[in-house]
Image (cartoon, grey):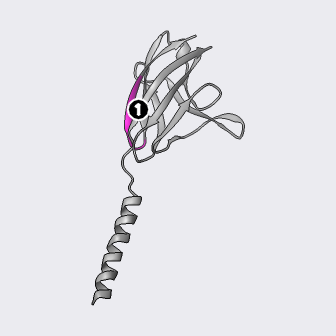
Amino acid sequence: MKSKGFSLFLTAILLFMVVGCSKSGPPEISIKWPKGLLEGTDAAVFMVILNDGEGGDSLTGCSVKEIPDLVCELHDIVDGRMKIVPAIEVPPKGTVELRPRGRHIMLIGAGQSGVSEVTVRLTFEKSGEKDVRTELVR
């Protein structure tokens, strides 16, 4: 009988350890230091995306609140070349830097819009939409 009780106790402890170790909470996304750089007819937007949460997330899209028809693309270096990508991964308890010559957001035609400041709406797979206000400078 003691053996059965011990086995039950050991099973409960192992189950607790597995559940406790595999805990995955929601992402907690915040944005720091957004900056838009106009170059010709387009603009590149840079920022730091922080995830203080236990779960990962993905930046899956973007748009510009003031100019809904503006094309907004996610870019990254793939095989040594700049490419449009469907998503940018944001790891749990991690940081992703959108920067020149690396991952960034492109606003196609923003230089022709005449605006000097925009609200970029970022769409995350799990966190939903986050609005980021940024200047567009030359």
Quadrant of the drawing holding the C terminus = top right
Q: Nearer the viewer, residue 39 or 132?
A: 132
Looking at the picture, how far across and down is residue 15, in whole percent?
36, 69
| Residue that lies at the very extreme toward the front in this rendered image | 2
91 sits to left or right of 76? left
85 sits to left or right of 92? right
Q: Nearer the viewer, residue 45 or 94?
A: 94
Position above or below: 59 against 72: below
17 sits to left or right of 45? left
Q: Secondary structure at mark 1?
A: strand
Q: Report the number of discs.
A: 1
- Residue at 45 percent across and 26 percent down: it is 32
Start-end of magenta stretch: 125-132
- Residue at 40 percent across and 65 percent down: it is 18
Neighbour tally class for label 1: few under 14, some 14-19, many 20 plus, Cα within 10 Å = few
The answer to which quarter of the image holds residue 23 is bottom left
Quadrant of the drawing holding the N terminus = bottom left
Position above or below: 35 against 115: below
Q: Which residue is mark 1?
A: 30
Q: Nearer the viewer, residue 133 or 69?
A: 133
Q: Is residue 131 magenta?
A: yes
Looking at the picture, how far across and down is residue 13, in whole percent?
34, 70
Looking at the picture, how far across and down is residue 117, in whole percent?
45, 13
Q: Nearer the viewer, residue 30 or 13?
A: 13
Q: Is residue 115 magenta?
A: no
Magenta part, dominant SS: strand
| Residue that lies at the very extreme toward the bottom in this rendered image | 1
Amino acid type at mark 1: Ser
- Residue at 55 percent across and 13 percent down: it is 111
Looking at the picture, how far across and down is residue 62, in whole percent?
46, 31
